[in-house]
Image: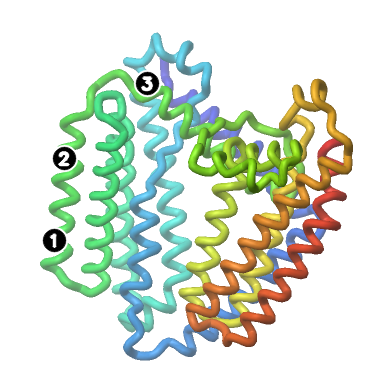
Amino acid sequence: MNTSELFYSRMKSAWTYAMRIIRVIIGGGGTPLILGIVLIALYFAYQQFLAWVPADFPIDFMLTIPYTLLVTSSRVRTWVKPADLVFLLPVETQMKPYFRASLTYSAAVHLIHLGILTLLAYPLFFIMWKSNLAIVLAYLFFTLLQVYNVLIEWWEMRLTVSLARNKIRMVTAGRFFLNGGTVFFFLNQHAAGVLGTAVGLFALGWYLRRQVPVIPYPWHLMQAQEQNIRTRYHALAGMFVDLPRLKTPVRKRKWFTRFLPHWSTQTASAYLFWRAFFRKSELFPISIRLIIWAMIFIAVFPNRWVVFAVYLGCVWMFSVQLPSLAHSQQYPIIHKLYPLPPKQWKQGLRSIGLVTIGIQTLSIALFAWLAGAMLLTETMLLIAVGGILTYTISYFYLPRSKQQKMA
C-alpha cells in the first residue's frame, strides 16, 4: 500500500475546497475593497516608518521576534481524520511514506511563509547590511533552520505517546530560546554565538530523535490538531462568507465561566452566549489574537494612520464573526426545549457585543498611547470613536444579524 498517494489525495481535496472559498471571498461584496484599503494604509505607514528609522534603531532585535516565532511554530499538517484511528491503525507500520509526504508538504508551506516574511523585511535587511548577497545568505540560513524545526516539531509530536505533555512543552520552550538566540546572533553576525546555539539546537534534535519510538503514532493528537487547524481556517473564512458549521471541541475554562452569573445580567440568553464564547466557539482565541497582533503592528509601526487602520480592521474582523454565537445550530436542543422570546436573544447578543468590542477598542487605543503612536488628545478621540462603534454595532448590527443567524 502506497500511503503517500493517500496524503496527496487529501491535500488535493483540501486545496480544491479552499480555492473555492477563496474565489467566493474575492468575488463577494466589499471584502476586497476593505482589505485593499487596509493594505494600502499599512503600505504607506511602512514607507513612513522606513523613512523615519534612525541609525541606532534595533532592527536586529525587531527582526528576531517574527523569525523566532515563525521557525519555532513549525506545525506539521497531517490531514488525519477521526476514522483513521480505526481504518489506518492496522497498517500503521506502512504509514511512513504518508508522514514523509506530510513533512515535505509542511516544510514547503513554512518556507513559503519564510519567503514572504523575508520579502516584507527586505528594506530593513538592506538598511542593516547594505548587501543583497547577505540577504540571500540569510534566507538560506533561515531555510535550514526552518526545515530542521519542522523535523523537531514532528519528533516532539511522536514523543507525546511516551512523555507527559508538560515535558514536551518544556522542550518546546527550550527550542524557542535556542531559535531566538540563533536568529539574534546571526543577525548580529556573531559567529561564536550562532555556533553555540546551533550546536545546542542540534543536540536537542539528536536527543529527541533517539527517543522517538517506531510505533505507535500519536493518532489522537494528530486528529485533534487537524481539527483545530480546520476550525481556525473555517473561522477565518467565516469572517467573509457564510460557511456550514464545524464540530468544535468544548473547553472547560473554569477560570472564566465561574464569573458568568455576574457577566450575564441574569438572563438565559446572555449566559448561554458567554458560555459558548469561552468554551466552544473560536471567538475567544480570535479576540485575544486580534488584540495581540494589533499591539505588535502598533509597536513595530508607531504611526497614527497604522493605528487607525488596525483599529478599524480588528473591530470589523471580530464584529462580522460575533453573530455566529446566535446560530440556531449552536443550541439545537435549547431551541426546542426552552424557547426564548426574540427580544431576550437580542439582549444577550447585545450585552456580549458591548463588553467584547468595548474591551477590544479600549485596549488597542490605550496601547497606542503607551507606545507613543498617538497623543493623549488623539487617544481620547479614538476611545470616543470606539465607544460609538461599539454602541452602533451592538445595538444595530448584531440584532439584525442575529435574526438571519437564528432563522
Q: Is residue 257 left or right of residue 173?
A: right
The C terminus - image quarter: top right
- Distance in Å between CA atoms under marks 3 and 2: 23 Å
Which comes before the other along the chain, label 2 or label 1? 1
> x and y percent of residue 176 in the render?
29, 53
Q: Nearer the viewer, mark 3 or mark 2?
A: 2
Give the camera-side residue of 135 and 310.
310
| Amino acid at circle 2 | Trp
Q: Nearer the viewer, residue 394 or 89?
A: 394
Residue 91 picture location, percent across and down:
38, 12
| Mark 2 vs 1: CB contact within 8 A | no
What residue is shown with label 1? 195
Q: Nearer the viewer, mark 3 or mark 1?
A: 1
Dot 1 crowding, Cα within 10 Å, few <14, some 14–19, many 20+: some
The residue lying at 40 percent from left, 23 percent from top is 219
Query: Is 190 placed above or below 354 here?
Result: below
Q: Is residue 400 above or below residue 300?
A: above
Tell me if I can see residue 106 in this picture: yes
Q: Amino acid at mark 3?
A: Met
Q: Residues within 10 Å of mark 3 (few under 14, many from 20)?
A: some
Numbered label attached to residue 95? 3
At mark 1, the secondary structure is helix
Q: Measured from the top left, where is residue 403 in percent x and y? A: 87, 43
Q: CA distance from mark 3 to mark 1?
A: 36 Å
Quadrant location of residue 102? top left
Residue 206 disc label: 2
Q: Residues within 10 Å of mark 2 (few under 14, many from 20)?
A: few
The residue shown at (42%, 19%) is: 2
The answer to whether 351 appears left or right of 246 in the picture is right
**Could you tell me residue 190's position as x and y percent?**
17, 72
**Which tag, 3 or 1, sits closer to the chain's start?**
3
